[in-house]
Image (cartoon, grey):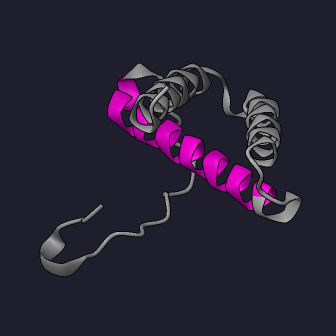
Amino acid sequence: MSVGAALELLLRLIHSRAMKLAALPEDERDVHYDLIRRACCEAAEHIGQNPDKAAITANDMVEFVHALVGIIEVGRGPDQGASTDRPPARHFGSRKHDVTRI
């Protein structure tokens, strides 16, 4: 499998998982984030990362999935079950000219 094909498959899997997580109540998501973290850490170690680097990689992936869940919730809007008691997401983009750059 090419790197591009593997990346495309991975992104589809992450998107699918994020959609399923967004449908769950917030108090039921932590166990799923832990499963993602464990699977990513094992995969990173399997491809040769040392355990410390694998843990960082796994945490980065969980943060990415968590951010996708937040985007999905915002996109659904308040009438479609999005949580309104969640704190605002951290912003990492540029605020220059009121444009967010990704």
97 or 2: nearer the viewer: 2
Main SS of the magenta part reads helix
Residue 26 drawn at (x, y percent) = 68, 33
Instruction: Based on the picture, tell me whether residue 66 belongs to the magenta stretch.
Output: yes
Q: Residue at x 39, y 36 (%)?
A: 4
Q: Is residue 31 left or right of residue 61?
A: right
Q: Work out which residue is located at the far bottom of the displayed protein and give it.
A: 96
**Residue at coordinates 61% horizontally, 26% vertically from top-left?**
21
* Residue 76 position in % (x across, y down): 36, 27
Q: Is residue 45 left or right of residue 21?
A: right
Using the rendered image of the protein, determine whether residue 100 is visible from the camera's viewpoint.
yes
> Residue 48 colored magenta?
no
Identity of the residue drawn at 34% across and 69% down: 93
Q: Is residue 58 above or below residue 83?
A: below
Q: Nearer the viewer, residue 31 or 48?
A: 48
Q: Is residue 96 above or below residue 26?
A: below
Quarter of the figure that contains the C terminus: bottom left
- Examine the rendered structure and indicate whether residue 41 appears above or below residue 88: above
Give the residue at x 42% y 67%: 91
Query: Whole-percent x and y of residue 77?
Result: 35, 31
Q: 72 or 35, which is in the foreground?
A: 35
Rendered image quadrant of residue 41 = top right
| Residue at the left extreme, as displayed | 97
- In the image, 91 versus 45, the foreground residue is 45
Say if residue 85 shows up in the picture: no
Q: Which residues are magenta?
A: 54-79
User: Which corner quadrant of the image does residue 95 belong to?
Assistant: bottom left
88 sits to left or right of 40:
left
